[in-house]
Image: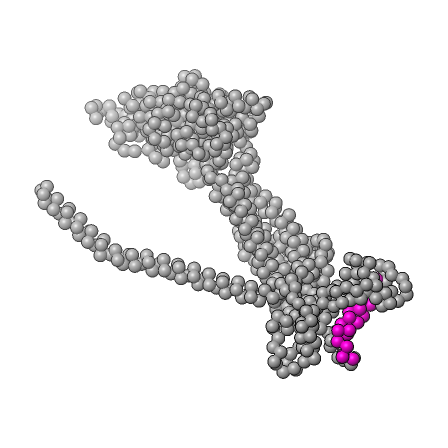
Amino acid sequence: MNKSKEDTYIRSEGARTHAIVRAGLAKRRAAEMRFRLYGLISIVVGLSFLVILFGNIFSHAWPAFQQTYVALDVKFDEAVLVPDARFDAGTQASADYPALLKRSLYALFPEVTDRQEKRSLYGLLSSGAAHEVQKRLQEKPDLLGKTERIWVPADDDVDMFTKGAMDRNAEEGDRRLADSQLAWLDKLRADGRLEKHFNMTFFTAGDSREPELAGVWGAVMGSFFTLLVTMTLSLPLGIATAVYLEEFAPRNRWTDIIEVNINNLAAVPSIVFGLLGLSVFINFFGLPRSSPMVGGLVLTLMTLPVIIIASRSALKSVPPSIREAALGVGASQMQTVFHHVLPLAMPGMLTGAIIGMARALGESAPLLMIGMVAFIVDIPGSMAEPSTVLPVQIYLWADSSERGFVERTSAAILVLMAFLILMNGLAVYLRKRFERRW
Amino acid sequence: MKNPEKTETKASFAREHDMTVGEIGAANLRIQCRGINVYYGEKHAIHNVSLDIGRNEVIALIGPSGCGKSTFLRCLNRMNDTIVGCRVSGEITLDGQNIYDSNLDVVPLRAQVGMVFQKPNPFPKSIFENVAYGPRIHGLVASKAELEEIVEGSLRRAGLWDEVKDYLLHPGTGLSGGQQQRLCIARTIAVNPEVILMDEPCSALDPIATAKIEQLIDELRNHYTIAIVTHSMQQAARVSQRTAYFHLGKLIEVGDTAQIFTNPKHQLTEDYITGRFG
């Protein structure tokens, strides 16, 4: 080939290549657009499910943050409260507060005289209403002998009625309130004695059989103590294990076996850990049943592998050049790890740990096995007292037949999710805070 | 190819005896290596290398990629210990002390034999902290003033002081590549090593930064023994007094730099430095 021939050849070949590239361009571009579209669709679908889920929970939970109260002019009558003229802590607790409520309620409806009728009238109030009166007198002992208007919680059926969850046009036998009760309620409302207020009880009370008296605080405290145990055990243990395995342990058959086992443990169904906790911590070591201590130990077993794996990958992602630099100036293995590697791995470790803790917070199955599913009214004050946790509380309420628990179940889910979002937010914050470039 | 007969005798000599051409000994002996073999698992990375390194000399280790020069360098301060599956046999003595003695603590060894790496690797801390780290962990200083003195002295000797004296508390990772490498050199000399190992210290740097580092190496030679691995033959010719040529894990030839580059005695060395391969 002479020079000009070769030149022509190259030029024609170049044009040909160019034409082929051009011809395929549309197809390539279409493929790219299609792929983007698929991604967009999946994100939209995912987001819309999230919106539906949240919308559903919010709309169900919203009414639970309000509670119907009835205003009564209660006369703290000494004749009723102090029949034997002695009023101290002992008699105060056992005094007949319901009688006070009944008196003031019946005074509003003088036409009600029949015993049966009176009972259904009093049934409009919550069974915990008398407790409110007692509490008020304890706060202000000089009320004795005086009259005060007190807002007491209404029964959950009344609550449902005022929130519109009960159809008053239904057959009398099909609804939980009788015609007469509805008439009384109408009169109370007309008098401005029936109102919805913010439901403080929900955030301060423990569990109850009555929806209007039930709250999440007991479960929140139970979750808090359980997570406290889990964190104090799994965080130092997990990080120390990861550091040892990653930085110090020799690579041999034993460490391989340990690694495989840790990875397997991370995949064990959580209820198995519950069974283990039942047989080891409760039956063998005799730790108190249903207590956050045992719950925390079980969740520690469950969280440890997660924290170890996350911490190891955080350690692995620290560039080896940093280790070499430290070793190169004569730092010992431990100085290298503690001065340079750990600070760089910390954000990743913390993120992993917090994600693990968030998982533990949402865990219910293993806790059912160790008795944290019991009906517990008292708010736990320590790690050894019986208690329940938020997800189990949700499970318990979801199982209750009273209509009032439906909204409280959703509200408890919201509380749980608020804590989860808080923890994940903390993880993101810590990662940003400690993240360093190298 | 001017003298085919001579070339033929050299090649056959090497083939028959499989020995290093040239004088492996050095005047004013500091490091003595005898019969070094290195294995990475099954792979035999270095074959029976013997080489001496003298006081106040710069020795350049050259050779094509994967020939084992970096591996050999890392034997000298036991950096290879950190590599899983790496085994070293043979004897290396530093001032008569066997550094592969099982009783020997690597911490003082690495303080004595410092290392500068291929990629600048300052700690993600301030410039001051980078240099102060070594003296601090070895307990070389009693007071803050003394530490500041060492930091300033090291940065001065690394030729970096004037550029960073107003930014000592800024992160070391914010410097340019050449400055980072000089910071790493300052960090190394801050612990007063006797030997400095440099593993391709200029491979990531531009020609101006390279020139500065080369000038620095020349100045450092008065105080330290320096072994430098380099891919640039010009660099080896510029900074070193002796040069060792590695090929496929073997030390082929060692000698005065001038002699290696002008009159190599081994065919492989000649091929490499004339650019026939590598």
Q: Would you place residue B132 above or below residue A368 in this image? A: above
Which residue is pictured at 72% across the width and 67% down the height?
A71
Rendered-image quadrant of the N terminus of chain B: top left
Rendered image quadrant of residue B44: top left
The x and y percentages for residue B258 are: 31, 20
Instruction: Decide whether residue A177 is among the magenta residues.
Output: no
In the image: residue B139, left or right of residue A288? left
Q: Compared with residue A148, is residue B183 higher up or lower down, i.e. above or below?
A: above
Which quadrant of the figure contains the C terminus of chain B? top left
Seen from the viewer's position, the closer of residues B274 and A115 is: A115
The answer to whether residue B168 is visible is yes
Horizontal and vertical percent position of residue A386: 71, 59
B147 to the left or right of B35: right
Residue in view at x 60 percent, y 72 percent: A164
Seen at 49% across and 43% down, the residue is A316
Q: Nearer the viewer, residue A436 or A374?
A: A436
Q: Nearer the viewer, residue A289 or B267?
A: A289
Question: Farthest front residue?
Answer: A191
Residue under the image location 36 percent in, 60 percent down: A37
Task: Tell me which segment is drawn in magenta.
Answer: A92-113
On whether residue A109 falls in the magenta region, the answer is yes
Main SS of residues in magenta: helix
Residue B21 drawn at (x, y percent): 33, 24
Q: Is residue B65 above or below residue A383?
A: above
Q: Give the quarter of the image for residue A202.
A: bottom right
Nearer-the-camera pick, A406 or A104: A104
Query: In the displayed structure, would residue A222 be above or below residue B216?
Result: below
- Residue A9 x, y percent position in the rendering: 13, 47
